[in-house]
Image: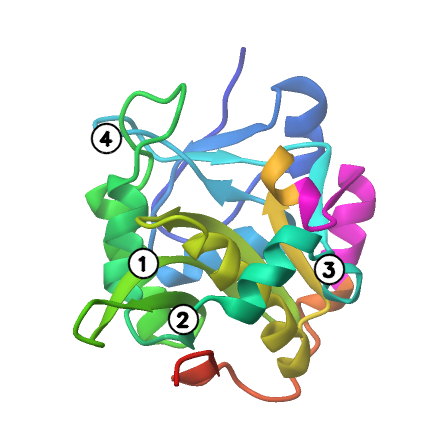
Amino acid sequence: MDIPVLDPGIPFFPDAAEAVARREGLVAVGGSLRPEWLLTAYPQGIFPWFSEGEPICWWALAPRTVLYPDKLHIGRSLAKTLRNKPYAVTVNRAFAEVVAACAAASRPGQNGTWITRRMRQAYEELHRIGHAHSFECWYPDGEGCLKLAGGLYGVQIGSVFFGESMFAAVSDASKIAFARAVPYLAQCGVKMIDCQMDTEHLARFGSENVGFEYFQTALQQLTVQPLQRPLLTETIFSNIG
């Protein structure tokens, strides 16, 4: 299989649709994880995914799993949890901590993590310049102090949020974070959430699979649309006291 190798200079990617058709989604190897590379990749439906010690690998998966915020589904059990459990959900309060927790989380069927040291540094830099965001779920402990229980992070370009990873150190925490994050993203003007891969967990929230050509067309339109308001650092929901 002839895999394109990228020079780490000017960010440029081969056709992602061709990679889907011919190389099972592997677009290229090499390049860089600098912000300009990531901000060039995501609007084309491309993202980095590789393990420690490997070269940077760029992927475009198809079919693509997306969630439209206005189609968010909250099941009966989760709705009860959202009403009754004491918790708070924040945005951008603990970005580095969320990424680190996602990297440390155990994944069934996976040996190690793809959130390498280089990847953590890259997304922390994206966060610093306003293109990566975290959502945190906090549970009160026995003394009433809030402890980070779960969360998620992703990349925002235009009116698209590209979900990267989530974790739950305590039961239901990532579900709560996601359930509160989606309406908040909609209020900010996000029209589509890229979930990358189809999972039963996301399907319960109303995700759907779309063809890669459709996905790319949507990205071309939505990644250039400005948000109605920026994703700030704030508490977006509290069910405590």
Q: Are marks 3 and 2 in contact (CB under 8 Å)?
A: no
Residue at the outermost left position: 143
Point out residue 173 in the picture as x, y percentages from the top left corner.
42, 56
Q: State whether residue 181 appears in this view.
A: no
Point out residue 77 in the picture as x, y percentages from the top left corner.
63, 52
- Between the C-alphas of marks 3 and 2, the distance is 20 Å
The residue mark sitting in front, 2 or 4, is 2
**Magenta residues?**
203-220
- Please give the residue where the numbered disc 4 appears in the rendered image: 52
Residue at the outermost bottom position: 229
Q: Residue at x 59, y 89 (%)?
A: 229
Q: State the image quarter where residue 35 is shown.
A: bottom left
The residue mark sitting in front, 1 or 4, is 1
Q: Are marks 1 and 3 in contact (CB under 8 Å)?
A: no
Q: Amino acid at mark 3?
A: Leu
Q: Which image quarter holds the N terminus?
A: top right
Q: Amino acid at mark 2?
A: Tyr
Where 57 falls versus 92 (above or below)?
above
The residue tagged with tag 2: helix, strand or loop?
A: loop
The residue mark sitting in front, 3 or 2, is 2
- Between the C-alphas of marks 4 and 3, the distance is 35 Å
Label number found at residue 87: 2
The residue tagged with tag 3: helix, strand or loop?
A: loop
- Please give the residue where the numbered disc 3 appears in the rendered image: 72
Q: Amino acid at mark 1?
A: Ala
Q: Are marks 2 and 1 in contact (CB under 8 Å)?
A: yes
